Image: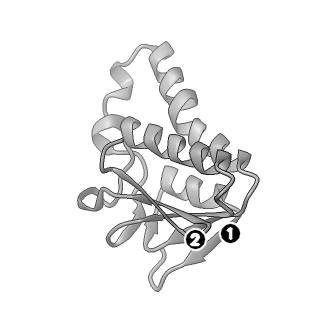
Amino acid sequence: MTDSVLVAQEDRVRTITLNRPESLNALTVLSMGELALALEAAGADPTVRAVIVTGTGSAFSAGGDLAFLQEIPTMAPARVKEVVYGTFQRVTRALRGIDKPVIAAVNGAAVGAGCEIAVAADFRRLGVRPE
């Protein structure tokens, strides 16, 4: 894993943090893949009783990274399908498949795919300035 998704555990609570504050935690294919892996691992780990998903800095997530989104029109349809279903929707499936409570700690803007992540969680805890 890179540093775009951080994983920590305290007692039986696993915290997964989106860590691209310079881009308001905008989601790339790489960071979404790492987020999906982290969620799947938390779901499979018997030492985890609850999962928190949050973001560093002033935003939960600004959604899809614009640099990536600008590439979509040039991609072959099969590649778009692979990215959307294999990466972006994999996160939603992982969130819905975890048999323990998932809390989205929304600490600022949650836009597009970031909003989708927050909505797919079982609970949402909104910060002082959720948007």
Q: Nearer the viewer, mark 1 or mark 2?
A: 2
Q: Residue at x 47, y 65 (%)?
A: 54
Residue furthest left as drawn: 22
Q: Earlier in the sequence, mark 1 or mark 2?
A: 2
Front residue of 5/13: it is: 13
Question: Count the marks: how many?
Answer: 2
Q: Residue at x 64, y 49 (%)?
A: 45
Rendered location of residue 24, percent (x, y): 32, 61
Q: Residue at x 30, y 50 (%)?
A: 3
Q: Quadrant of residue 126?
A: bottom right
Dot 1: within a 10 Å radius of its alpha carbon, few (fewer than 14), some, or many (20 or more) residues?
Answer: some
Instruction: Give the amino acid type for the residue marked by disc 2 in the picture.
Output: Asp
As drawn, the label of residue 11 is: 2
Does residue 126 appear anywhere in the picture? yes
Q: Is residue 67 left or right of residue 44?
A: left
Rendered location of residue 76, percent (x, y): 42, 13
As measured in the structure, the alpha-carbon distance from the residue carrying label 1 to the one carrying label 2 is 20 Å
Give the answer, above or below, for where 64 lies relative to 20: above
Q: In which quarter of the image is residue 61?
A: bottom left
- In the picture, which quadrant includes the N terminus? top left
Q: Quadrant of residue 52?
A: bottom right
Residue under label 1 = 123
Front residue of 119/5: it is: 5
Circle 1 sits in a helix, a strand or a loop, which is it?
strand
Does residue 112 appear anywhere in the picture? no
Circle 2 sits in a helix, a strand or a loop, which is it?
loop
Rendered location of residue 117, percent (x, y): 57, 54
The colour scheme used here is one colour
Q: Which residue is drawn at 63% across and 71% down?
A: 124
Rendered location of residue 58, percent (x, y): 34, 72
